Image (cartoon, rainbow, N blue to C red):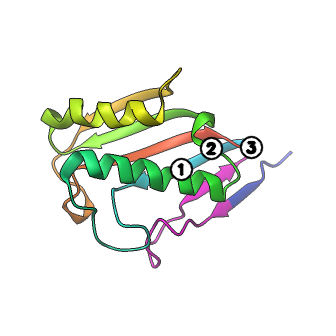
């Protein structure tokens, strides 16, 4: 039996990007990397890694909602940080969004991110509420 594939676009990501916000394959949702951008714009929120992390996770929350899911269905996240010195500040915000039984996670230090962002976060989640 073929696995059903469905694509979702969230208003959190700017239009004209060459990728989908979320792709559903079977009962799994793959959420594209999200920066701390102002929803729908090619501009980051002000306030550095703390504000960017909060907005990236809000953008992910919005993308999951468009796909009919939610943050409590996230099973894995990957966080990309330009400066590993921001690890603790990112974690403080991350804990607000995943306070109990957080998903599995990998955090990777990278040389640069799009739009000169400090953080990017992608997720895998289960479909449904």
Classify residue 105 by image quadrant. Answer: top left
The mark nearer the N terminus, 1 or 3, is 1
Identity of the residue drawn at 28% across and 51% down: 51
Residue 27 against residue 56 in the figure, above or below: above
Q: Are marks 2 and 1 in contact (CB under 8 Å)?
A: yes
The mark nearer the N terminus, 2 or 1, is 1
Identity of the residue drawn at 62% across and 44% down: 70
Identity of the residue drawn at 71% across and 43% down: 127
Q: Dot 2: within a 10 Å radius of its alpha carbon, few (fewer than 14), some, or many (20 or more) residues?
A: some
Q: Dot 1: within a 10 Å radius of its alpha carbon, few (fewer than 14), some, or many (20 or more) residues?
A: many
Q: Nearer the viewer, residue 32 or 42?
A: 42
Position in image of residue 106 (x %, y %): 37, 30
Q: Dot 3: within a 10 Å radius of its alpha carbon, few (fewer than 14), some, or many (20 or more) residues?
A: some
Identity of the residue drawn at 45% across and 79% down: 16
Q: Is residue 14 found left or right of 84 in the rendered image?
A: right
Q: Is disc 1 placed on a helix, strand or loop?
A: helix
Quadrant containing the C terminus is: top right
Q: Are marks 1 and 3 in contact (CB under 8 Å)?
A: no
Q: Residue furthest top?
A: 101
Report the magenta residues as a range.
7-25
| Closer to the eye: label 1 or 3 | 1
Q: Nearer the viewer, residue 108 or 71?
A: 71
Mark 1 to mark 3 CA distance (whole Å): 13 Å
Residue 43 against residue 129 in the figure, above or below: below
Residue identifier under label 1: 61
Position in image of residue 74 (x %, y %): 57, 36
Residue identifier under label 3: 128
Residue identifier under label 2: 70
Mark 3 to mark 2 CA distance (whole Å): 8 Å
Q: Is disc 3 placed on a helix, strand or loop?
A: loop
Mark 2 to mark 1 CA distance (whole Å): 6 Å
Position in image of residue 77 (x %, y %): 45, 36
């Amino acid at each position: 039996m073929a696995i059903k594939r469905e694509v979702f676009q969230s208003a959190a990501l700017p239009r004209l990007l060459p990728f989908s916000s979320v792709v559903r394959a079977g009962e799994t949702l793959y959420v594209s990397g999200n920066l701390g951008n102002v929803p729908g714009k090619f501009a980051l929120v002000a306030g550095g890694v703390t504000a960017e992390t909060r907005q990236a996770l809000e953008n992910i929350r919005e993308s999951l909602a468009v796909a009919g899911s939610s943050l409590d269905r996230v099973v894995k996240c990957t966080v990309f940080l330009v400066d590993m010195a921001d690890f603790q500040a990112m974690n403080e915000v991350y804990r607000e969004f995943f306070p109990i039984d957080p998903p599995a996670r990998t955090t990777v230090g990278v040389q640069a991110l799009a739009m000169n962002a400090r953080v990017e976060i992608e997720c895998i989640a289960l479909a449904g509420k």
